[in-house]
Amino acid sequence: MDTNSVSAAVNSDDPAVGLRAVGALHRLAEQVEAAHVALARRQGWSWEQIGDALGVSRQSVHAKYGK
């Protein structure tokens, strides 16, 4: 699903269409998060700073991206 399709699907009366849009939004959010975590690490941010910015613990963000 591209961005325009997701935008239209969010307002659909068909639950199947809406739920596919939710899935697409989750995938997009994960991609954006990963890109910005990587950017923050390259710029010297600590895991604690990243966790604070995301509203999670440093341990959880490190477990997810610290590989």
Image (cartoon, rainbow, N blue to C red):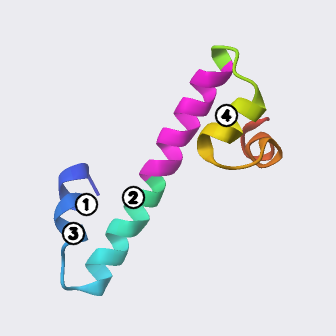
Residue at the disc numbered 4: 50
Q: Are marks 1 and 2 in contact (CB under 8 Å)?
A: yes
- Closer-to-camera residue (41/54): 54
Q: CA distance from mark 1 to mark 4?
A: 28 Å
Q: Is residue 40 above or below residue 6?
A: above
Residue at the disc numbered 3: 9
Q: Amino acid at mark 4?
A: Ile
Q: CA distance from mark 2 to mark 4?
A: 21 Å
Q: Is residue 55 above or below residue 18?
A: above
Q: Residues within 10 Å of mark 1 (few under 14, many from 20)?
A: some
Q: Amino acid at mark 3?
A: Ala
Q: Residues within 10 Å of mark 3 (few under 14, many from 20)?
A: many
**Mark 2 or 4 closer to N-term?**
2
Q: Are marks 1 and 4 in contact (CB under 8 Å)?
A: no
Identify the residue shown where x is 79% and y is 40%. Answer: 62
Q: Residues within 10 Å of mark 2 (few under 14, many from 20)?
A: some
Identify the residue shown where x is 67% and y is 40%. Answer: 52
Question: Which label was assigned to residue 55?
Answer: none
**Mark 4 or 3 closer to N-term?**
3
